Amino acid sequence: MLLTGTGRLAPGGLSPWALLVRDGRIAWVGSPADAPSGDAVDLGAALVTPGLVDSHTHPVFAGDRSDEAAARLEGAAYTDGGILRTMRATRAADDATLETLVETRLRAALAAGTTTVECKSGYGLSLAEELRHLRILRRVAERVPVRVVTTFLGAHAVPPEASSVAEYAAHVADEMIPAVADERLAEFVDIFADAGFFDLASTERIARAAAAAGLGVRLHAEQLARTGAAELGVRLGAASVDHLEQLDAAGVTALAGSATVATLLPAPAIVLRDRLPPARALLDAGASVALASDANAGTYGGFGTMPMVIGLGAALLGMSVSEALTAATAGGAAALRRPDLGGLAVGMAADLVAWDADHEGAFALRLGAVRPLRIWIAGEEIDLRG
Amino acid sequence: MLLTGTGRLAPGGLSPWALLVRDGRIAWVGSPADAPSGDAVDLGAALVTPGLVDSHTHPVFAGDRSDEAAARLEGAAYTDGGILRTMRATRAADDATLETLVETRLRAALAAGTTTVECKSGYGLSLAEELRHLRILRRVAERVPVRVVTTFLGAHAVPPEASSVAEYAAHVADEMIPAVADERLAEFVDIFADAGFFDLASTERIARAAAAAGLGVRLHAEQLARTGAAELGVRLGAASVDHLEQLDAAGVTALAGSATVATLLPAPAIVLRDRLPPARALLDAGASVALASDANAGTYGGFGTMPMVIGLGAALLGMSVSEALTAATAGGAAALRRPDLGGLAVGMAADLVAWDADHEGAFALRLGAVRPLRIWIAGEEIDLRG
């Protein structure tokens, strides 16, 4: 399949452009004058980008915490009480209910141009419930054409049944991770390594169990307090450390010298009226940066909003639009250790989106009110009416 | 027509609730137990609010300035060059093209829950072009069921044909405003009263011509510099002064003691990486505050995004969700001098939206990813498939 356009192929901004897809991958990209002969799908003036990669979401939950968001914005504190409220509602929801909720969220992401979405468990907080949620993710992933990368986040909070952080961390490491790995239910293990959640020792214990089981590691880090979780993530070889609102200059330096991606989540940062993560410092220092939605039950509920996240990256985090778009494509792919996704180079997956825009600046100018006209994943066009 | 729900009628939060519509207006509101007998439309658990009032938009333009937004976020300056670029593209577009663009934008606003939208001209900047744009607005308003309030913004920038600000201001005051008023093409006159655009003397000259012609006055004020335009607006009896990013404590005090509404536009403020307007100070001082989108050609392109604007008001401007929702309904209505709109009291227009949410906190929690399930304007249900 040959795609051509007179608009922009971004990031990079090639215009006009031609792109040859073979066996689901990009086989050639260049000027239309040099393209192989044959029928082409002409995308006209539409902006075309790699499919967006949302490398941080929590789609498996029931219940609604909008009332809590409203109360928090009038001064109530953000505590782990919220996660446990969602845990109770989610444990009480049957499989069919949860599958419908997850499917709706994944379809919203896809319809908004996200072609790869990382999905965490973490509102179950018991072996049986976490396995149930991961199995639901697997079933939904089979019927929605978006690429799903699954992460086990048993260490999202300490459930009321546990007597201590250390006891629950041991349970996650010794019982839950082996069961998840046995059933091949996740590629990554995530840990909420922050003040009031999992301390560094418990985090390291869980992360070493993940590595022993052959699973990658990612951390929620430096959101609520500067704890050193970013440096621990680097030392453990984490694929990504996410949030980083409280990161300081030493943390920026540690990440810049590492293979660990700094994943920034501007949407929950502003919903929580938190500090914004040091995006400009991370980019200037040479760190790998991803932008993701963090769509979840309690601190940011917007599934299908990656175009807005790109806009917020540019408007609020000091990134150029090109940097923000790259962070939401190649950056997200790097955070998922998927170098074949999120780019336009020969050999990469042909995951592409044609947008109702002429230029990538529209992600900022419209703060995300930019919609896909057509989407391809592995060279197969997605039916957007689905 | 009787509407009932077990969810929330907000702002105010009545739950459960019943609302009687008669002759397009709210005839009664209260508890279902006290409701008049008869068949009811049951909205279940859905959040129901007044229709949103977007009191500041610029929908009549052609061309795309996404490239300029991208360049600006890499350090280029915002100047009036941008408005003149849109002026050229818009003057070059024929009526059918502009009508289609305006209709698409108004339908996007309506589909997102905006039931009243103020629409400015201002990309024509000549008598013939401004009249053409206002006539296009009138024609489109006849076929889109949203309520349209039209504003003449001939004083948006000084066109290249004019030799000075004063000369063009005299033309606006002496030639353009009488022609607009003769044809009853607008209810308001707006003036970009800011540094590099219209000075206070020129602004006053235009505003006095508007008043003489029986038109209301509104100002773009205190966006680029603290000029005193807010106080001038109060002195002239302006319905609203809009933007206010540079407003100081004295300006807050002046507005708080006046009938002039302070209209805040967080979306372009962040796209321009500008200061944020002093929303909290204005509310605490007792000023009337509106939130609006400012959807336009160059500094914020998101038509149909009032739910996000409410979210940004809460997340970025220090407003509670209830304050932000009120500012986007009753506040916008006050800014348009339409006390019959934007509220739930008996006698007000039955403009109502049922949302895919349970609680108004969803506007913040989801940063605008909240969609109407059903919309009524003057008691008539809108076909959302239109």
Image (cartoon, coloured by chain):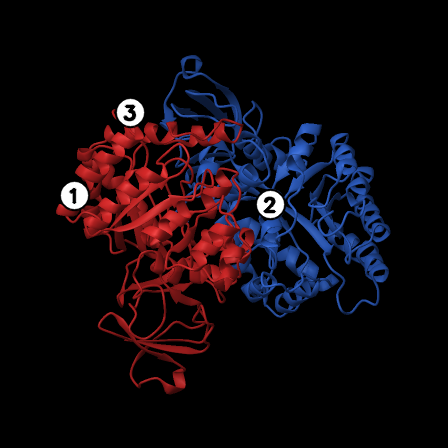
Chain colours: A blue, B red
Question: Is B312 or B100 nearer to us in this picture?
Answer: B312
User: Is label 2 on the same chain as label 1?
Assistant: no
Taking A52 as reference, is B386 above or below it?
below
Amino acid of disc 1: Pro
Disc number for residue B178: 1
Q: Residue furthest top?
A: A34
Residue at 41 percent of width and 82 percent of height: B31
Which of discs 2 and 3 lies nearer the camera? The answer is 3
Give the percent coordinates (x, y) of residue A277: 66, 42
Which badge, 1 or 3, comes first in the chain's sequence? 3
The reply to whether callout 1 and callout 3 are in contact (CB within 8 Å) is no
Q: What residue does disc 3 label?
A: B160
Alpha carbons under labels 2 and 1: distance apart = 48 Å
Q: What residue does disc 2 label?
A: A266
Question: Is B257 or B23 nearer to us in this picture?
Answer: B257
Residue at 67 percent of width and 28 percent of height: A284
Can residue B368 be spotted in the picture?
no
**Other residues around mark 3 within 10 Å, as few (<14) / some (14–19) / many (≥20):** few
User: Is label 1 on the same chain as label 3?
Assistant: yes
Q: Helix, strand, or loop for circle 2?
A: helix
Amino acid of disc 3: Pro
Q: Residue furthest left?
A: B182
In this picture, residue A208 sits left or right of residue A25: right
Please give the chain letter of the residue carrying mark 1.
B
